Amino acid sequence: MENAIGQYERDWQSFNRIYQQIAVANNITFGELSILLALESHKFYAANRQLVLDTGNNKLNGTKLTQQGIMVSKTNPADKRSRVITLTAAGQKWAVKILNAIHTVERCAMVLRSNN
């Protein structure tokens, strides 16, 4: 069991290094990349609170993604006390390119892992 835990941690660190490289290559922070991944898992529409829970990042509204018009924050129609975060149409196209790069790396890693 200890070997499996050690391998998991090494794999996790390796993926984080790759994610960091992808973030830098796309001129975003690791935190912003985390937001994109979390938004993707919610079909690019999520309550602010959900994204905070998913990413641990509590500064969703002031990010460069919002300032550049990639991500928008609006009042939640289901609960006026909260906000929902979405990507603009252009933001979704941009994000999909970045996310596809991540998923390609993940698929390749899984194939390599299963062959060992």
Image (tube, rainbow, N blue to C red):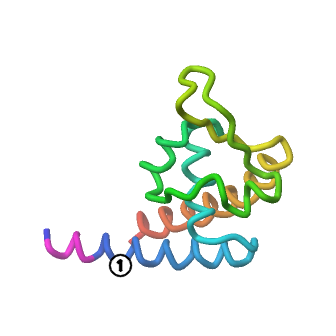
- Closest to the observer, 61 or 89: 61
- Closest to the observer, 106 or 43: 43
Residue 3 in the magenta stretch? The answer is yes
Q: Residue 103, percent across and down?
A: 61, 58
Left or right position of 100 against 5: right
Label 1 secondary element = helix
Q: As displayed, is residue 63 above or below residue 69?
A: below
- Where is the C terminus found, in terms of image quarters? bottom left
Q: Which residue lies furthest to the top in this view?
A: 78
Task: Identify the residue shown where x is 73% and y is 63%.
Answer: 64
Q: Quadrant of residue 47?
A: top right
Task: Identify the residue shown where x is 57% and y is 76%.
Answer: 18
- Closest to the observer, 115 or 107: 107
Task: Identify the residue shown where x is 49% and y is 73%.
Answer: 16
Q: Quadrant of residue 104?
A: bottom right
- Closest to the observer, 89 or 84: 84
Task: Identify the residue shown where x is 60% and y is 66%.
Answer: 105
Q: Residue 82, percent across and down?
A: 54, 34
Give the class, few, some or many, for how many residues have Cα within 10 Å of label 1's Cα (few <14, many ≥20). Answer: few
Main secondary structure along the magenta-highlighted residues: helix
Range covered by the magenta-colored residues: 2-6
Q: Residue 51, percent across and down?
A: 51, 47
Q: As displayed, is residue 9 above or below residue 104?
A: below
Q: Residue furthest front?
A: 81
Q: Which residue lies furthest to the left in this view?
A: 1
